[in-house]
Amino acid sequence: MTHPDWRQIQRDHLFFTWTRQAASNGWEIDAAEGARFHVPGRGWIWDLESQVYNVNAGHNHPHIKRRMVDQINELPAAAPGAVLPIRATLAEKLVTHTGLERAFLTTGGSEAVENAIKIARLFTGRRKILARRHSYHGATFATLAIGGDARKDPFVADLSPSYHIDDPYPLPPRGDGPSAWLASVQRLVAREGPDTIAAILLEGLTGTNGVQIPPDDFWPGVRQLCDEHRILLIDDEIFSGFGRTGRWFACEHWQVRPDIMVIGKGLTSGYAPLAGVMVNREISEYFVDQTLWCGLTHYAHPVSCAAAVGAVEVLEHDKLVENAASVGQHLFARVAALRDDAVIGAHLVDVRGRGLMLAVEFDRAAESLVARLWARNVYCPARTRTLFLCPPLCLTRHQADQVADLLVDAAREEFASG
Ligand SMILES: Cc1ncc(COP(=O)(O)O)c(C=O)c1O
């Protein structure tokens, strides 16, 4: 019996995100395991995007599924105000890993950033939110306005003003004073007036806007500036959190603790929708007697909480954060070695990142290289000239070598003609 043409039905009746519908190239997936997914009639594909930077714990993990099924059997639906063991269990885990005090749990990342903004405004009584020019914090009106990503362009006439830190990359040569990034944020705070600024919002490590490694003085300098002026530091770890960079959260690379942290994606490893806002003790205590004007129907959904507990347990038990650090370092070294490759070297502009959050920039649009990788059963996301290597964190060293070999092969073919 032939099965219906799911691809055609979906193309006819469901929208694909961020694309002209005629240009969508969604493929059917019928299975996934570890660091790969399976496309019928095609085979097993290396997933270097982890299903939109989501599946940190790896595909089809039995422990996460068991946690979810147990919760479905026990209680699959409950109002936000209900006390549930699975919610309390998750809260304790989040406090342990972030070092912060209390969580507000939402469905998706953009909503979480919006709620972080609301919390910062309620707590400080101030309005402005500063962010980096090369940043993405979500696709709602408020979050598009704050970030610098080009996805805001069609709506720009309707958006509130943004306050952007200049973050040139490659980093300009450094003199005796602060780096260009830190000097920019210092100027911006002085120009706007510290008393008007509720928060500075930064991605732990910038995702689709380029994975630029900030100058050493940036995070500590921003922390100091925030402390001096009682501005809140909000760390958006939606992309970079839950082990992606080889630490639980990317801000740990700079030994900085934010006042508010936004989490999502890897929180449940994509097994169910959940994101959240973590706040420090002072903010947590402020809302003991003040109303928290935030709430959503699906707040802390029980099955999503179970997925999150399961995913965090897998990261802990399988030591995937440590694995991301060591396998990431190996993959980085393999790709960086291409600088000396007779065919590819001249076209390789930069390799950067931490853990399994790597960006590889070439001197031309990455589109045809992405197609060559796909022909070798590697799905690799790209933006303009940059490839992103962000596989599930269970990728082994041996698998990293397989992926690197396929990348070398595809790149040699791509650049063979100069
Ligand atoms: C850093 C960052 N913030 C916010 C978001 C928005 O999250 P969501 O797509 O879950 O709304 C994303 C999504 O890619 C992100 O990478």
Image (tube, rainbow, N blue to C red):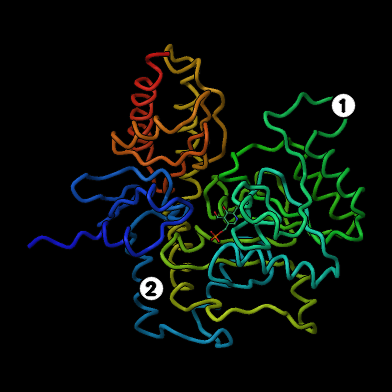
Above or below, 392 relative to 141: above
SS at mark 2 in the image: helix
Q: Is residue 29 above or below residue 289?
A: above
Mark 2 residue type: Met
Q: Picture coordinates of residue 407 (x, y %)?
A: 38, 29
Please name the amino acid that badge 1 sits on. Asp
Residue receiving disc 2: 68
Q: Residues within 10 Å of mark 1 (few under 14, many from 20)?
A: few
> Residue 400 location in percent, x, y?
38, 36
In the picture, residue 294 is in which quadrant? bottom right
Which residue is located at x 42 percent, y 54 percent?
318
Q: What residue did someone put label 1 on? A: 176
Give the camera-side residue of 380 and 394.
Answer: 380
Give the Cα distance between marks 2 and 1: 54 Å
Instruction: Measuring from the top left, give residue 50's x and y in whole percent.
Output: 42, 50
For the point 85% across and 66% down, the residue is 126
Question: In terms of depth relative to the viewer, which is nearer, 374 or 328?
Answer: 374
240 sits to left or right of 28: right
On screen, residue 69 versus residue 219, left or right, reads: left
Mark 2 and mark 1 lie on one chain; the one further toward the N terminus is: 2
Q: Is mark 2 within 8 Å of ligand 1?
A: no
